[in-house]
Image (tube, rainbow, N blue to C red):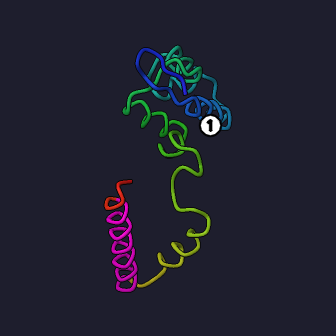
Amino acid sequence: MEVVKGFVLDMAFSQRLVSFRKEKGLTQQALADRVGIHVIQIHRYESGTSQPSLEVIKKLAVALSITTDALLFDQEERGPSEDLKLQFEAVAKFDPEARQVAKTVLDGLILQHQARRLASGE
């Protein structure tokens, strides 16, 4: 990470932005036009010298037809781990009543885990 004028810049964001823009076959100017900002701002975001506002992040995601999570997080940074994905997919197919039971069990386990962490001072 790099600190510029008091801001912590995640260099991975700039790399992801470049990658998604190129994947869509867009120039910096074309992306700037879609987002409604000056091309210099796109250059700054991609070089890591500036960070977009939340509003601009949303516009970038729409312009690139991706989620904001895809722009902001590494693939492994969000969502369940691989060993849980299949289980969550199976639970999503449960009828509403069974899905609610599964959610209640998970909520209980999460609360229990959080209580243990607080008690141990983590």
Q: Residue at x 39, y 53 (%)?
A: 122
Query: Magenta part of the protein: which range?
Result: 96-117
In front here: 40 or 3? 3
Furthest residue in direction front, as rendered: 120
Tell me if residue 8 comes above or below residue 68 in the rendering.
Answer: above
Residue 102 part of the magenta-drawn span: yes
**Which residue was labeled with disc 1?**
20
Q: Name the chief secondary structure element in magenta.
A: helix
Other-residue count near label 1 (Cα within 10 Å), few / some / many at <14 / 14–19 / ≥20: some
Q: Residue drawn 53% across and 73% down?
A: 89
Q: Residue 19: name its quadrant.
A: top right
- In the rendered image, which quarter contains the N terminus? top right
- Magenta residue check for 89: no
Task: Judge from the rendering whether residue 5 lies leftward or rightward of residue 119; answer left or right.
Answer: right
Q: Does residue 38 appear to the left or right of 117 in the view shown?
A: right
Which is nearer the eye, 18 or 87?
87
Query: Which structural element holds mark 1?
Result: helix
> x, y (%) of residue 16?
60, 35
